[in-house]
Amino acid sequence: MKINVPVNHNYYEEAPIQELELGDSFSVRKSATKKVEQLFSPVYELKLVAAQLKQVKIINFKGKRFDPDEERLILKLYSKEKPEGDKEYFIQTGLYAGVLFHKGCKFNIAPKYGDAFLKRMLNFVNDIYVDTQKVQAKKDDAENQALFIIAYLFIHTLEKAAVLGLPQQYRNNRERSHKVKGRIDFNHYLNRDIPFQGKLTSSFRERLYVQEIIDILHLALRKLESVFGKDINGHLLGLTQLLKQEYSGRFVTHETIQKAKRHQAIQNPMYSGFKRVLEYAEIILQDKDLMPDSDHQNLSTTGYLFDISELFELYLEKLLIRKFPEWIVNGQEQIATYQKQFYHRSMFPDLVMKHRETGKVAVFDAKFKKMNFDRRDVDRSDFHQIHSYSGFYQNVLMASGLIYPLSEECNIEKAHSTSLYGSGDNEINFIIDGIYVSEGHSMKQVIENENAFLERVSNTVR
């Protein structure tokens, strides 16, 4: 059984799943009602701090710091009984995209807002600011969305890591021939080559590629080709040919992957970039093997997840850095409060802009959540949090606000206030703003909306 669901889904419990028809991606017939009941009862809730996550790989984009007491929702399944006795089934998701296997069911938690916007954010993570990549996830295939993210990160991380070549190691070899390589092995000469027959045994050290790493990279690229086509490797043609040439012909096992990840060659700073490359390759190769056997459906939840909110924050951070060279832009700047008291705390605003000359500050929080300019879309805790940051910087603050992917056109001026708290006794701008995105937007439209957003920010901090 498979369920396709977007991130940050059903926040207000606005979309119960019908018992007999759970949407285009998940339909259940009467004979499957018992299985559905087992899946949604009792309440199943998976959070980032839960012990169930031991078998789930969490992939972060920037190592964001969280309050140790904070619990972040990943997936929640539950049912409610209606007055007439029927049941409604609900799925809620947080801000993590990826693949989870639970009770024999595969959950494909897909990013929102279309391939173009996802690709644009991933471009910025990899410091690619020109749109040249033609590859995208297959249309109407939510199952491949998470694999697409892994593929994108794997390809570009491999491209960077391989600039200095593939990991190599020295190996001691011995050869008996007419030519001498290295030094003559006199012990072997005395034992076997007297009387002299025209050949000598010599020993030498030779640099060879690490075979386990070669095999893993080659098979990971082959798998991506089978899903996304050969264009996925467009940036790596020379490297792809080398990997094909050096491939041993053996299939990769779990032991092979672990041996490669522990290999001393990647402890060399020159090859340290391959640590992350191998992490991505492991997920690509084991993607289909994460599903528990039907006889073991009560095992721990398995899978892999991406923090999409981190991806959005990093995208905005790099976007602002490029647009505002006269400002210092910091992501996750630490605000230490009450350091001498037992109730001391640290706060971490997502984006802090400091003007290089005047010292003025603008502080923003990035929220990868639904924004239709409905009052409910501004979460109470998010609203209070940004005002806490604003209070800390109040003496030098000139602007603050919340930034979203905007899913619907509206009069953006209604979301801007020329004074903090709207009181009129200060000149600190407060905004709810962001970038208009949609499933149907092309990359050109995404970039146009991106530029319009940057222009509005420029007017706010002017």
Image: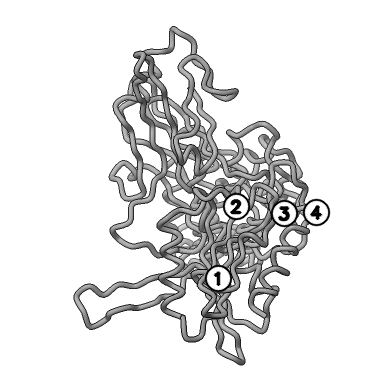
Q: Please tell me which residue lies in front, 132 or 423.
A: 423
Please say if 224 is above or below 67. above
Label located before the other in sequence (3 or 1): 3
Please say if 242 is above or below 203. above
3 vs 2, front mark: 2
* CA separation in Å, label 3 and label 2: 11 Å
Q: Label 4, secondary structure: give it.
A: helix
Amino acid at dot 2: Phe
Per the image, the residue denoted by label 3 is 236
Label located before the other in sequence (2 or 1): 2
Per the image, the residue denoted by label 2 is 154
Q: Are marks 3 and 2 in contact (CB under 8 Å)?
A: no
Per the image, the residue denoted by label 4 is 444
Badge 4 crowding class, 10 Å Cα cut-off, few under 14, some 14 to 19, many 20 or more, is: few
Q: Are marks 1 and 4 in contact (CB under 8 Å)?
A: no
Task: Name the residue at 41% across, 13% down.
Answer: 33
